[in-house]
Amino acid sequence: MLQKIIFILLSFMFMGNAVEVGHVLPKVILDKANGGTADDKVWNSKILKGKVHTLLYMDPDKRSDSQILLDALAKLNIDNHKYSTVAIINLAATWMPNSILQSKLKEKQKELNNMEYVFDKTKFLVKKWHLKDDASNVMILDKNSKVIYQKSGKLSTKDVEKILQIISKTI
């Protein structure tokens, strides 16, 4: 019984910055030490304000879990001033060499309209936002960085339909 109480208390202590629907996403910075953008610059989550965002936090080995969403998002034709997609790649969750993966995604970013790739080298956001590790995490953020949708794991066709409806309604 005492172990259960201690576990519950510790859980509440570490939930401070957890990502929750209805709450503003806690601000973070990914820099040289823990990640950054595809062009090796610092990434600050404060840029997630001012327009609607789909935020994907992915283990590259679990890309297929959200591929159906990536395909649907690639077909969207929404004004860049109102919407964008940010894919944060959890480099610490894969066996693939970081340099190869970063190079590949840097090239892919040039092809994809309205998508930015960001890298997390140390599972910083798993810890800071309490995201599911070794998984695909999807969030929709409103113009104020408030989380209006969140799901971890494999996405279904229904999930994607719901996400697209939320994006369209929120813009």
Image (spheres, helix red, strand yellow):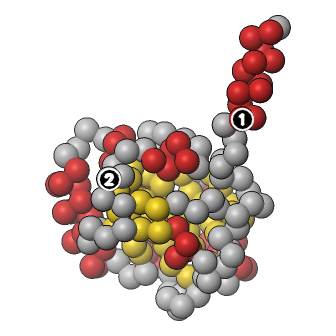
Q: Could you tell me which residue is drawn at 50 percent across and 88 percent down?
A: 80
- Say left or right for 111 vs 116: left
Residue 34 position within the rendered picture, expressed as x and y whole percent measured from the top left: 36, 52
- Say left or right for 45 vs 40: right
Which corner quadrant of the image does residue 7 belong to? top right
- Which quarter of the image is occupied by the C terminus? bottom right
Residue 35 position within the rendered picture, expressed as x and y whole percent measured from the top left: 35, 56
Residue 43 seen in the current view: yes
The one of 69 and 122 positioned closer to us in this rendering: 122
Neighbourhood count class around disc 1 (C-alpha, 10 Å): few under 14, some 14–19, many 20 upward: few
- Say left or right for 38 vs 55: left
The residue most toward the top is 1
Which corner quadrant of the image does residue 94 belong to? top left
- Which quarter of the image is occupied by the N terminus? top right
Which residue has dot 2 on it? 33
Task: Say what secondary structure mark 1 lies in.
Answer: helix
What kind of residue is marked 2? Ala
Residue 6 position within the rendered picture, expressed as x and y whole percent measured from the top left: 75, 18
Residue 54 position within the rendered picture, expressed as x and y whole percent measured from the top left: 55, 69
Which residue has dot 1 on it? 13
Q: Could you tell me which residue is drawn at 52 percent across and 68 percent down?
A: 45
Instruction: Tell which circle, 2 or 1, labels the residue nearer the N-terminal end.
Output: 1
Task: Say what secondary structure mark 2 lies in.
Answer: loop
Residue 90 - label: none
Q: Could you tell me which residue is drawn at 46 percent across and 62 percent down?
A: 29
The one of 21 and 31 positioned closer to us in this rendering: 31
